[in-house]
Image (tube, rainbow, N blue to C red):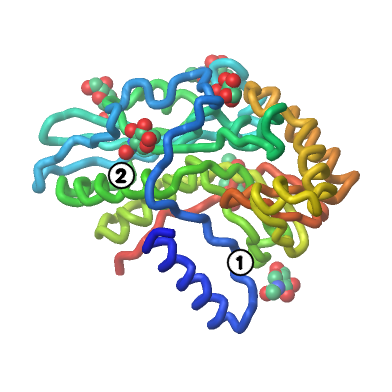
Amino acid sequence: MTLKCVYFHILICYSVLIGFGKKVWPVPYRRFDHRPPTDPYCQALYPFCPTGDPDGRIPYMKDNDVISVFRLQTPVWEFKYGDLLGKFHIMHDAIGFASSDTQKNYTMEWYELFQLGNCTFPHDREDIMAPFWCNQGAACFFDGIDDVHWKQNGTLEKVGEISGKQFNDLARWVQEDNKTGIYYETWTVRSDPVPNSTTWFDSYDCSQFVHRTYRKLAELGAKLSSKTQTNYTKIYLYSGEPTYLGDDGSIFDQPSMKTLATDIKKFYHSFQPHQSILQFIRSLIDVYNKVVLEKTFYLFYNFEYWHLPMKPPYIQITFEEVPLPSMWP
Ligand SMILES: *[C@@H]1O[C@H](CO)[C@@H](O)[C@H](O)[C@H]1NC(C)=O
Ligand SMILES: *[C@@H]1O[C@H](CO)[C@@H](O)[C@H](O)[C@H]1NC(C)=O
Ligand SMILES: *[C@@H]1O[C@H](CO)[C@@H](O)[C@H](O)[C@H]1NC(C)=O
Ligand SMILES: *[C@@H]1O[C@H](CO)[C@@H](O)[C@H](O)[C@H]1NC(C)=O
Ligand SMILES: *[C@@H]1O[C@H](CO)[C@@H](O)[C@H](O)[C@H]1NC(C)=O
Ligand SMILES: *[C@@H]1O[C@H](CO)[C@@H](O)[C@H](O)[C@H]1NC(C)=O
């Protein structure tokens, strides 16, 4: 166990103590001390970050440069499926930067290494008992902003200006965030579809990266504002209080847990991980039907399984407002 890990455990104990034994919701997303190489079983159909620097380097800006910050949003795979997803409002989010000193501009985004299907559903491998996940996600920083791509059915809006120094500070933070937050999480799990309901688990996806980045920018002193409503895609599950089940080792390697292990495998068996976005939507509909019938969902979060006692409206895809942060007075 590394020192960081011990520290993390102490923090958890402390949080539990001050909560007088109450569980902490939402369950904190686990950070790692480094990103492990991906398993050779996971093969990307489309290469991750093809035009980014292979080592994830971000160019250094002059301290007194003025960098424009852009909010970028576009429907997912808009070219292939046009209108259909517009209705589902499954959007992809990114951030753009443009240097006034060099006139060069850049795009920064966070997404799945092996696409959304692989981050949402595991593989059933004959040689391995536990479901197998290809669920890493990472940040990609690359040269250029493709104005047409973002503008045409989405958003390209300047939301602020920062100094070169603020940009360099942000770059360091992005690299650290990218090393410690390594896997994608599609679902946000809540108790009810009302604003003051309990969130059991938060998603960890492209829009969460964008929100984290905006919060970091605000913390660094940036002023951000948008002329339009800033809405983002959320994929919700609704359930009563979740129950912790265990990890691969405690569920799939224990003969006494055979029934649970079989149930989890059966649950995921119907969904295909390597699918197009259209098939993904179909799988979501399949999940919905299964969940309405069985009232059960086995959530994989922090490399551990939880049982969700599902309840109406079970699953929702929303496109809702998350305002830009304003930490400045
Ligand atoms: C999902 O993972 C499988 C297993 O590695 C791979 O064959 C497939 O190409 C992946 N899908 C995508 C869209 O990358
Ligand atoms: C983030 O991590 C991925 C995977 O290791 C890497 O390909 C990418 O270049 C990194 N991005 C940044 C901005 O550090
Ligand atoms: C934008 O939407 C229109 C109408 O829905 C469609 O014809 C067009 O191809 C879309 N443009 C892009 C770049 O996806
Ligand atoms: C980014 O740079 C390209 C090439 O100079 C330019 O065509 C485009 O308008 C720029 N976009 C933004 C948002 O600055
Ligand atoms: C949540 O809001 C609803 C109405 O919007 C109210 O009836 C309910 O009492 C609130 N619950 C809590 C825990 O604040
Ligand atoms: C954006 O979100 C707000 C509140 O969350 C909602 O009322 C509005 O309809 C959404 N806009 C679109 C285009 O969906």
Q: Position of residue 83 (x, y in %)?
A: 63, 23
Image-quarter location of ligand 1: top right
90 above or below 43?
Answer: below
- Hey, what amino acid is under mark 1? Trp
Q: Position of residue 313 (x, y in %)?
A: 80, 50
Q: Residues within 10 Å of mark 2 (few under 14, many from 20)?
A: some
Residue 175 — which label? 2
Identify the residue shown where x is 52% and y is 22%.
43
Identify the residue shown where x is 42% and y is 34%.
37
Q: Classify mark 2: helix, strand or loop.
A: helix
Identify the residue shown where x is 48% and y is 68%.
9
- Hey, what amino acid is under mark 2? Gln
87 lies left or right of 174: right
- Image mark count: 2
Q: Quadrant of residue 68?
A: top left
Identify the residue shown where x is 53% and y is 41%.
184
> Is the residue indicated by label 2 positioned so its CB lies within 8 Å of ligand 2?
yes
149 lies left or right of 173: right
- Marks 1/2 in contact by CB < 8 Å: the verdict is no
- First reached walking from the N terminus: tag 1 or tag 2: 1
Q: Position of residue 233 (x, y in %)?
A: 58, 42
Which residue occupies the foreground of this view, 26 or 121? 121
145 above or below 191?
Answer: above
Q: Quadrant of the C terminus?
A: bottom left
Q: Quadrant of the N terminus?
A: bottom left
Q: Quadrant of residue 72?
A: top left
Reading the image, the residue beneath label 1 is 25
Residue lying farthest to the right in this orientation = 293
